[in-house]
Image (cartoon, helix red, strand yellow):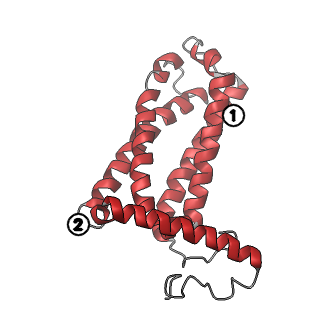
Amino acid sequence: MLGWRDCGGQVPGLHEHRDARIVVGVGMSAVNTLTDFARATGIHAFMNTAYGWPAMESLHFVGLSLLMGTVGLFDLRMLGLFKSMPVAALHRLVPWGVAGYILNVCTGALFFVSDTAQYLYNPAFQLKVLCMLIAGVNMIVFYTTTAATVKALPVETSTPLHAKIIAAISLLAWSGVITFGRLITFYRPPEHWCFWC
């Protein structure tokens, strides 16, 4: 299969419209810039060794486990499970989830710059990023509107409805991140297949 580099940057059939040329041109510029960065810094070489990608993938799953094991448990408590556990005590575990998220961002960035075109044009990756944005906005809403009330709740007390909604959105968004992240490796479309890229 011919890639965009084999066609001299020209994607057959896609360049018939001026707007498509602009979008693809910007995308190609980003791909080239990130690919050049990965090669210049040695990231590309490291990730393409026998141990580079598997080691980063393992760390990525450790980060994901920390994130879901803490934030997921906190969300389940807000949904009404484990009422014997104080919300404030569970919330003290959230920094471990934040550490897991930071680990995932770092390892994910290594994946992304090592094979930018594969990720940039992959709908599974695009949906994963969308779910991460939803989770991020949801977290901001939680900490600006609900966190203080929920953390002050005594044991065996149900959380308010709006806290349950926030928790459900959080669990769904992070489940989407996991699902779409896994689909990235199974669904590898040809570069520039999508009309919005």
At label 2, counting other C-alpha atoms closer than 10 Å, the crowd grade (few under 14, some 14-19, many 20 or more) is: few
Identify the residue shown where x is 58% and y is 53%.
Answer: 129
Is residue 138 depicted above or below 158 in this figure? below
SS class, disc 2: loop
The image's mark for residue 165 is: 1
SS class, disc 1: helix
Q: Nearer the viewer, residue 85 or 16?
A: 16
Residue for badge 2: 50
**What amino acid does circle 1 point to?**
Ile
Question: Which x, y percent locates residue 4?
Answer: 53, 81
Question: Which x, y percent locates residue 14?
Answer: 69, 83
Q: Quadrant of residue 25?
A: bottom right
* Residue 195 appears in the rendering: no
Total marks shown come to: 2
Q: Nearer the viewer, residue 118 or 42?
A: 42
Q: Earlier in the sequence, mark 1 or mark 2?
A: 2
Question: Which x, y percent locates residue 67?
Answer: 45, 38
Identify the residue shown where x is 64% and y is 44%.
Answer: 134
The image's mark for residue 102 is: none
The answer to whether residue 136 is left or right of residue 181 is right
Question: Which x, y percent locates residue 7?
Answer: 54, 88
Distance between mark 1 and mark 2 Cα atoms: 44 Å
Identify the residue shown where x is 28% and y is 61%.
Answer: 46
Is residue 11 depicted above or below 102 in this figure? below
